Amino acid sequence: MTRTALITGATSGFGAAAVHCFAKAGWRVIATGRRAERLQPLVDAYPGLVHAAAFDVRDSAAMEAALAALPAEFAGIDLLVNNAGLAQGTAPAQNASLDDWRTMIDTNVTALVTLTHRLLPQLVQRKGAIINISSVAGVYPYPGGNAYGGTKAFVSQFSLGLRADLHGTGVRVTTIEPGMAETEFTVVRTHGDQAASDKLYSGANPMTAEDIAEQIFWVASLPAHLNINRLEVMPVTQSFAGFQVARD
């Protein structure tokens, strides 16, 4: 039986790479994102296997309309990959933009729980799975991480709560917590500063979007009686941040 995955944030990075990974393996994939022009090449690459649903995950009405309009062959969703998310700004909390904070909370938290809540009855019925993309930033704090780290800590804890609540339903819940990976993440975080992104990743041999997509697919492909609760993954070149000491 062909299974169907809904992958948010599929216009770039982990999401786009995951669409390729699942479609190549014969899954049907609902690829969502704001930029329709980036979703269409995925549809073209995998005729009949990828359906594009262009909407902003923060717009619950648009989300509902897109789900209601799914073709019959894509309507039975077996896997939800909550990948859409972003960081905005690198300033310390006392200098941070409140608008940036709200954008991260609306995208990383509110949109994620809204879509999850909408699909939970179906996922329970189909004994499906949820894979939430969190971050090591939700575990290890660092200067400038403030609201972003807070949103990802929520994602990780929410996932554990889902796992507890869904006990006995057969639904699997996994959080994947990546470290440094070279995608559009830092360009978005710095509001378009490509030079800052290039500097961050230069010489670091970071992970790639494909690396994380492979982890998503591996988790989704495990036998139904196995659940990966948390999967934390970093490049070898990255390790845990040290403590800070302020001196007189």
Image: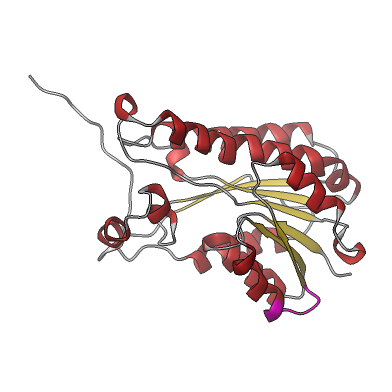
- Which residue occupies the foreground of this view, 174 or 132? 132
Percent of width and height locating residue 25: 72, 75
User: Can residue 46 be found in the magenta stretch?
Assistant: yes
Percent of width and height locating residue 139: 45, 37
Q: What is the quadrant of the C terminus in the image? A: top left
Magenta segment boundaries in residue numbering: 44-49
- Which residue occupies the foreground of this view, 213 or 48? 48
25 versus 165 height, above or below = below
Q: What is the quadrant of the N terminus in the image? A: bottom right
- Which residue occupies the foreground of this view, 241 or 185? 185
Number of numbered callouts drawn: 0
Inspect this view and state whether residue 65 appears. yes
Return the residue found at the far top. Answer: 248
Left or right of 149 on screen, residue 162? right
234 versus 245 height, above or below = below
Q: Quadrant of residue 22?
A: bottom right
Instruction: Please name the residue shown 51% across and 32% down the image.
Output: 102
Q: Quadrant of residue 165?
A: top right
Task: Name the magenta segment's main secondary structure.
Answer: loop
Percent of width and height locating residue 232: 50, 49
User: Can residue 34 be found in the magenta stretch?
Assistant: no
110 versus 62 height, above or below = above
Percent of width and height locating residue 94: 31, 24
Instruction: Please name the residue shown 64% across and 75% down the image.
Output: 41
Instruction: Please name the residue shown 59% across and 33% down the image.
Output: 157
Instruction: Please name the residue shown 64% across and 41% down the image.
Output: 58
- Which residue occupies the foreground of this view, 12 or 182? 12
Inspect this view and state whether residue 128 appears. no
